[in-house]
Image (tube, rainbow, N blue to C red):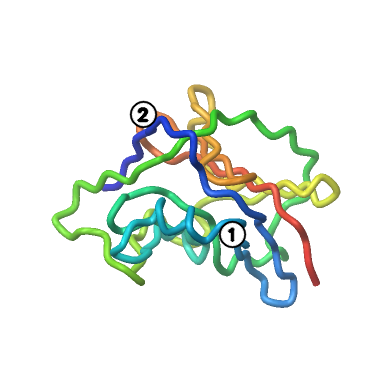
């Protein structure tokens, strides 16, 4: 079981989340590679897997870094979205598993298709969520334009502000 802890920090990963329509997926363009190195640590990057959508995690630090991966827009629902304001801080993965995070390996958080994706393409926002528990969420911006909704250490939704590219 994976849970998340908030860690006060002035430094979160700065960059631009991009959706590549031709690849049906996201990539994160980092502004300062040295910040990525500091936030990830020296043991590489693993990820949390929400189906085919991934959240990169520093293996050494446990810090959530940025979203990436295959997430086909053809399954997104159109919506007018009002994104939450997230408090800027780090989120660290705490695993109750005996298997530690590993570089290049994804830790499954949930299977594909378990959450819904709603997109406001005009505003450039995507909400990926489990609508079961949205009342008591705390919102944390863990990277530029990337907001997590967390309740009792559990990830319940993600908000992404992104640039759409063909």
Q: Which residue is drawn at 27% across and 44% down?
A: 94
Residue 24: image quadrant is bottom right
Outermost residue on the right side: it is 122
The kind of secondary structure element at disc 1 is: strand
Q: Which residue is drawn at 14% across and 55% down?
A: 98
* Residue 56, horizontal then vertical, whole percent: 44, 59
Q: Which residue, given by chain and number where applicable, does mark 1 sit on?
A: 30
Is 114 left, or right, of 26 in this rendering? left
Q: How many marks?
A: 2
For marks 2 and 1, the one nearer the N-term is 1
- The answer to whether residue 78 is left or right of residue 56 is right
Q: Residue furthest bottom?
A: 22
At a point 64% along the width and 28% down the height, the residue shown is: 85
Residue corresponding to mark 2:
152
Q: Do the residues labelled 2 and 1 touch (CB within 8 Å)?
A: no
Q: Outermost residue toward the top?
A: 136
In the rendering, at what x and y percent does residue 32 appear? 56, 57
Q: What kind of element bears circle 2?
A: loop
Neighbour tally class for label 1: few under 14, some 14-19, many 20 plus, Cα within 10 Å: some
Residue 38 vertical placement versus 106 (above, below): above
């Amino acid at each position: 079981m994976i849970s998340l802890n908030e860690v006060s920090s002035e430094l979160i990963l700065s960059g631009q989340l991009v959706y590549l329509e031709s690849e049906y997926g996201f990539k994160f363009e980092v502004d300062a590679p040295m910040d990525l190195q500091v936030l990830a640590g020296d043991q590489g990057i693993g990820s949390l897997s929400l189906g085919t959508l991934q959240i990169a995690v520093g293996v050494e630090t446990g810090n959530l870094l940025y979203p990436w991966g295959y997430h086909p827009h053809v399954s997104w629902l159109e919506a007018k979205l009002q994104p939450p304001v997230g408090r800027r801080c780090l989120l660290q993965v705490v695993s109750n598993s005996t298997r530690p995070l590993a570089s290049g390996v994804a830790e499954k958080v949930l299977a594909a298709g378990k959450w819904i994706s709603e997109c406001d393409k005009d505003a450039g926002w995507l909400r990926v969520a489990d609508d079961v528990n949205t009342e008591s969420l705390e919102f944390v911006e863990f990277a530029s334009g990337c907001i997590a909704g967390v309740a009792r250490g559990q990830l319940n939704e993600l908000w992404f502000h992104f640039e759409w590219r063909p």
